[in-house]
Amino acid sequence: MSTPVATHRNPLAYKSDLKPVWCPGCGDYGVLSSLYQAFSRKDVAPEEVVIVAGIGCSGRLPGYVHAYGFHGVHGRTLPIATGVKLANPSLTVFAVGGDGDGLAIGGGHIPHAARRNVDITYLMLDNSIYAQTKGQSSPTTSLDWETTSMPYGTIEDPLNPIAMAIAYGVTFVARGYAARSQQLVELIMRAMDHKGFSFIHIISPCVTHHDTYKEMAAKVMDIPAGHDPSDKVAAFRLAQEEERVPLGVFYQVQRPAFHERLEEIRHKAAPDGPVTVEDLLSRFK
Amino acid sequence: MDAILRISGRCGEGVILAGEILTLAAARSGLEVFSVKDYPAEMKGGLCTFQLRLGDQSLVSQGDRPDLLLAFNEQAYQEHGHQVPDGGLLVYDQDVFRVEDERLRAFGIALTTIAQREINFLPGRNILAAGVIGGLLSLEYGKIEEVVRHALRRKVEEVVAKNVQALASGYQQGLELRPQVGLPAFQPHPDQERLILTGNQAIAMGALAAGCRFYSGYPITPATEIMERLAEDLPKLGGDLVQTEDEIAALAMALGASFAGKKAMTATSGPGLSLMTELLDLASMAEIPVVIVDVQRAGPSTGLPTKTEQSDLNHLLYGGHGEAPRIVIAPTTVEDAFYQTIRAFNLAEKYQMPVYLVSDQHLSQRMQTVPKLDLSRFPVVNRELAPEGDGKYQRYELTSSGISPMSVPGREHGIYVATGLEHDLSGHPNYEPEMHRAMTAKRFRKLAQASKELDGARAYGPHQALVGVLGWGSTEGAVREAADRALREGLPVAVLYPEALNPLPERAIRDFAARVKRVLVPEVNYTGQLAQLLRAKYGLEAERLNKSEGTPFTPVEIYQKIKEVAGDEHARRYPQEPAGLQKRP
């Protein structure tokens, strides 16, 4: 942060030589460019960044960033990213996935990443549709919306990712919009600064299967300046907003991060410093 | 010389604890021990049984019929009494039931009354019983008390004192009874370096010795003790352990940690193994070293969670989508479990692929004395890292061995994306026909390379034999003991245990098949999974011995089958002569 802006790496320094496979106009481009800018402004070394991604359109993102990446399986970004962070806590670790990846197949991992308060940033690129498989209902598809898997209209109520994250005890909960890049850059930077599990729900419309740009343009609003992010009840109330889509930081608190707790455990287990395998074996005599 | 003692009672009465205390005390008194436990999945009720075999010479199996049965109740007697040979010993709680058994030498002891009235502490009945056996064996009292105190170290002092009182009282009873009972007097061989541990403990310790510094896992019987051991020990060595939300997260987290440079492991059993299968493919495809321990239990689905079986072999060899090379190795003894775990890490690191280390309830939960463990037997191998230079780094570079030097996050010139998508040399997604062919071949080349160092098998017995027993995993002890008995009787039997189940040591197996008349494949499963594999791969028609009862083979079961196979073969070749006794021409 204290480094003069002039010496910062250019946002293009984080661009890989792969051309994205996304449709023109896809919200994911906005997220990708916001990420380049946030990295540039934080001036983070590319080799110190790891982006773990799931399956779906957004899962391709690590390939377009000049940084380490792990494109795993569907729904498992959080446990993989947790493993990366714990193995080397000095790394800046991101998990990136869609609404299907994070809320359907991988929904069981969010509460546990939250409980651990693992120091990673989770970007959920929400287009409210299964886009890569060409248009099936997802956990955030609006009721009645006609999709290829629910041609008579979606009959399951959508989830509320922000309210879930607050309920789970995620220590940094925010929402951004792919089409509002400057705000998203700020949110990503704040999430990177946050020590603990940070979650950004990013509205990232799909121009091909579920184009919500028009709808969103009318619905998005900034979270009022007077909102106190440490007020959990206020954050929860804000998350219940149905007519509008509030953008900004809903909730933020500080708790020890998981790697710090593990560090404490190591001191507890071996107060006089590490022991040897020989020492441990001798207990079985 | 050895003796087999069996203790059986209602679960929750502390039968297993009593057995474990005696096992540890006997081992620390300088005896060789081999003990197994048999228990239901429920916490209370049902029958729990502990079998302790001890002697002054090395023991390779739990043995057959018990020389002494200690029955806590009538059900235990009904279930196990008939297995005690004629003239064998029965010690029972005479306050709970009465026995008229002319076949056995029965000794009633008022376990309940003594615990309740004299010590005023009924829960100490199991420790009292352990004391009785300790006295009957004339184990050194101080050793038993030391073990009891350690086992109860987290209890309040009053409880410990009551239990010690029960132990002393029982020990005295045992000593007084000893002249009538007449258990053998063993010659202890105090060995300062000898260890006593379970298979699961050996796996945990092997992992630490191999440099494992990250473990993620989910509790599941009968693998949980690996996690529990490491939960206590990993932090002492600067490592981390995470209890995950499920087995999927367990393997996912281990892969993340390994990708970032730590040696990582997870352990599970059948149902968890099924959940991990998608990530096994990812590890194989993205070429990430990882060790996955499968402690097999019996049956499909929830099955028989606390019982043993060797029925996951097909899953381990073939489970997964697409064609994903993996290494499968199966330790056979507690000692071997330690070394093979080190080896599993070495193989995973060297070949950058998932390694399945296969145990089962019988191996993982047995307690066995082992000689001093040699940390230098399998020197620790670490993954090959690409040199740090300015040249373009290609994570999946095509090499003749198939092994491409790795990079880890933090290295400036090694930036790449690990991926489960088919990819080109740089790791970029690529679906070209030629690329898929080349990359599949590369991944399998590593397996071919690994087969060069996994070409061996542990052979036992004469070079030429009438019967050749070819097995895998935890059955080795019972098979060796059966083979020894047959050999003593002049029946030529050879034994072969391959070092790996994938890749299989083809030459060693073909050579073995050529030097024995009949191959016998004993497996604790219903369908004969290794036998099927041997037929499919090498056209080997083997005799099979299968058992799917949730219990391990006893030596006598193997021995009888060896005799049967030898008899058939002998009768076929020499119709006039009695089977088994003639030397082969």
Image (spheres, grey):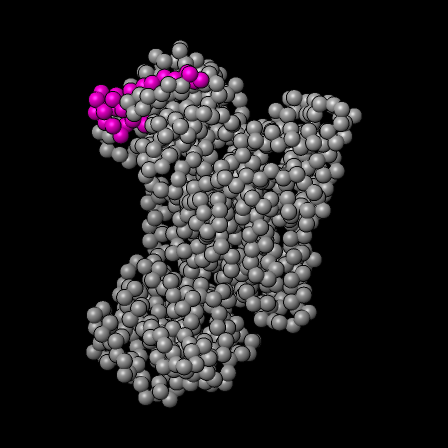
Camera sees residue B94: yes
Camera sees residue A68: no
Taking the spot 48% from the left edge, 29% from the top edge, the residue there is: B34
Say if the magenta span includes residue B109: yes
Q: Residue furthest right?
A: B585
The span shown in magenta is B102-128
Q: Residue furthest top?
A: B179
In the rendering, at what x and y percent does residue A35 appear? 43, 75
Q: Nearer the viewer, residue B326 or A182?
A: B326
Q: Answer with the quarter of the image where residue B151 lies.
A: top left
In the rendering, at what x and y percent does residue B296 appear? 50, 45
Q: Nearer the viewer, residue B394 or B453?
A: B453
Q: Is residue B464 left or right of residue B424?
A: right
Q: How many marks?
A: 0
Taking the spot 31% from the left edge, 24% from the top edge, the residue there is: B97
Q: Nearer the viewer, residue B243 or A157?
A: A157
Vertical position of residue B495 compared to residue B530: above or below: above
Vertical position of residue B558 compared to residue A14: above or below: above
Q: Is residue B494 left or right of residue A235?
A: right
In the rendering, at what x and y percent does residue A247 appear? 31, 79
Taking the spot 70% from the left edge, 44% from the top edge, the residue there is: B540
In the rendering, at what x and y percent does residue A102 appear? 40, 68
Say if the magenta span includes residue B525: no
Taking the spot 67% from the left edge, 40% from the top edge, the residue there is: B542
Q: Answer with the quarter of the image where residue B7 lies.
A: top left
Q: Nearer the viewer, residue B246 or A137?
A: A137
Q: Quadrant of the C terminus of chain B?
A: top right
Q: Is residue B164 left or right of residue B295?
A: left
